[in-house]
Amino acid sequence: MRLLLTSDTHLPKRAAQLPARLLADMDAADAVLHAGDWVDVATLDLFEARSRRLVGVFGNNDGPELRSRLTAFARVECEGLRLGIVHETGASQGREKRCADRYPDLDVLVFGHSHIPWDTTAPGGLRLLNPGSPTDRRRQPYCTYMTAEVVDARIDVRLHRLPRRA
């Protein structure tokens, strides 16, 4: 099963449109996981129209209309792998232990908010993934997103760096 992991799209404030590479990977994915901060309802509509399966949550920058269509936390099972999606996990210091304590029944937690790509494993095995942002690199050298292959409850993740916009 092919997954696309993204977060913090922030359209149209941070970019006029989504990167073409992200859209191509969205079309190829069996499921798309979005960890919040869509900002614009049209972005959610676009993801829903293009995704075979969309699992998304709202973020701190998402208004009432988005919050009425999304939840703060979502979970999905893919090929026996138990994934959770949430926007915020708090400070980076202590994140692994805090998330492992809060989500003991997950194998993978996808999160956003910081725009900083993150891939670590907590004691006990919880994998924490932040795909960064495909539209707002903040203090990072690149805008990013992730794709993943899930087979037999195992996940292979790839971070994609997008070219800088002119």
Image (tube, rainbow, N blue to C red):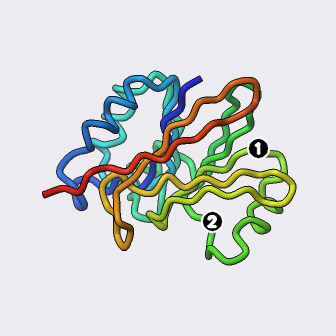
x, y percent for residue 98 = 76, 68
Q: Is residue 113 left or right of residue 104?
A: left
Q: Is residue 16 above or below residue 81?
A: below
Q: CA distance from mark 2 to mark 1?
A: 16 Å
Q: Is residue 2 above or below residue 105?
A: above
Give, as a three-letter code, the residue at label 1. Answer: Asp
Q: Nearer the viewer, residue 48 or 153?
A: 153
Picture quarter with the C terminus = bottom left
- Which residue bears the numbered disc 1? 107
- Residue at the outermost right position: 124
Give, as a three-letter code, the residue at label 2. Answer: Thr
| Mark 2 vs mark 1: in front | 1
Q: Nearer the viewer, residue 26 or 47?
A: 26
Q: Residues within 10 Å of mark 2 (few under 14, many from 20)?
A: some
x, y percent for residue 8 = 40, 56
Q: Residues within 10 Å of mark 1 (few under 14, many from 20)?
A: many
Picture quarter with the N terminus = top right
Task: Return the mark for residue 130.
Answer: none
Residue at x 60%, y 52% (from the top left corner): 129
Residue at x 62%, y 76% (from the top left corner): 91
Residue 39 found in image quarter: bottom left
Helix, strand or loop under label 1: loop
Helix, strand or loop under label 2: loop
x, y percent for residue 118 = 57, 59
Q: Nearer the viewer, residue 54 or 147?
A: 147
Residue 76 found in image quarter: top right
Q: Is residue 116 above or below residue 50?
A: below
Task: Return the mark for residue 89.
Answer: 2
Residue at x 50%, y 38% (from the top left corner): 147
